[in-house]
Image (tube, rainbow, N blue to C red):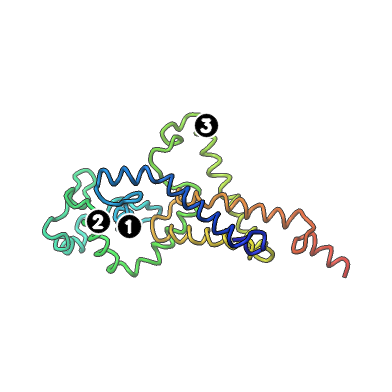
Amino acid sequence: MVLLRQQRLSLKKAVQAALIIIVVACAVIAPWTIRNYMLLHRFVPVALGTAQALGGAYNDTTLHPNAMGDMPWMPKGSPMARSMWINLHGEGLWLDAQTNKLRLPPSQVTNAGITAYMEYWVPIHLRDMPRLLVLRLINTFTPYTSENGLPMIQFPTRISSIVVWDLVWYTTPLILLLAARGLIVTWRRWRQDLLPVYLIIVLTIGTNLATYGSSRFRAPIEPLFVILATGFFWWLCTDEPGTRRYRRRQKQQS
């Protein structure tokens, strides 16, 4: 988009490049799509996890700070329990003896069952949506949110795990702060050139707000934050128009 706007790339070559990217992407996922068709006997490009993702993002668990959107559950004695019995067509709820919490019965942990739960839960929690979005926004920019199976969690005493853990907690806030400042200074000078970067960041954050709000889902845009942080150093250290030194020199000359 940037090269096309600056007329460094013709429309024909831009379309060709886009088609090549699409073909390569399809070739990468094609083996998995073929595998899905052989097992399920229908066209499934990648996965069928939409219901689980949305069901895990909209339930009582997610209303607690730093919640990660576990499988749907309701506290024992919840006023929703009676309605949920009806909503699940007489299947009832399953009481987890260890946590003493009501969950979907094993027979209902399916796409249809979880979708039914979500469709029931969202309309009666509209007042909680602003709070839920704030929690997800906080989680999105929290250096680390709980994830299962990471090596630094499985082997916390290893030197590599300790180093990675410290890097996560100390470098992430620094990069985010520099990126925020870089966003301001690059917007003034390079907003048209960096428009794709801004759009990808906004789209990713929006996806986080609509689903889980996890540091893992922030990973795709972290390189873009580094680019914006570099923009801050461009503003701080160079003499080009729009930078700090350039403005100082202009004031001195005037």
Q: Mark 1 = which residue?
A: 54
Which of discs 3 and 2 lies nearer the camera? The answer is 2
Q: Nearer the viewer, residue 46 or 238?
A: 46
The spot of residue 140 in percent (x, y) is 47, 54
Residue 205 can be seen in this image: yes
Residue 130 lies, with reference to residue 228, above or below; the image says below
Q: Residue at point 53% right, 62% down?
A: 199
Q: Residues within 10 Å of mark 1 (few under 14, many from 20)?
A: many
Give the residue type at disc 1.
Leu
Q: Residue at point 68% right, 56% down?
A: 232
Q: Secondary structure at mark 2?
A: helix
Pointers 2 and 1 in contact (C-beta within 8 Å): yes
Q: Secondary structure at mark 1?
A: helix
| Residue 183, picture quadrant | bottom right
Q: Residues within 10 Å of mark 2 (few under 14, many from 20)?
A: many
Q: Mark 2 = which residue?
A: 114
Quarter that holds the N terminus: bottom right
| Residue 5, picture quadrant | bottom right
Q: Secondary structure at mark 3?
A: helix
Q: Mark 3 = which residue?
A: 160
Instruction: Give the CA separation, mark 2 to mark 1.
Output: 8 Å
Residue 123 lies, with reference to residue 228, above or below; the image says below
The spot of residue 55 in percent (x, y) is 29, 56
Image side of residue 2 versus residue 128, left or right: right
Query: Going from the N terminus, do you reach mark 3 or mark 2 first?
Result: 2
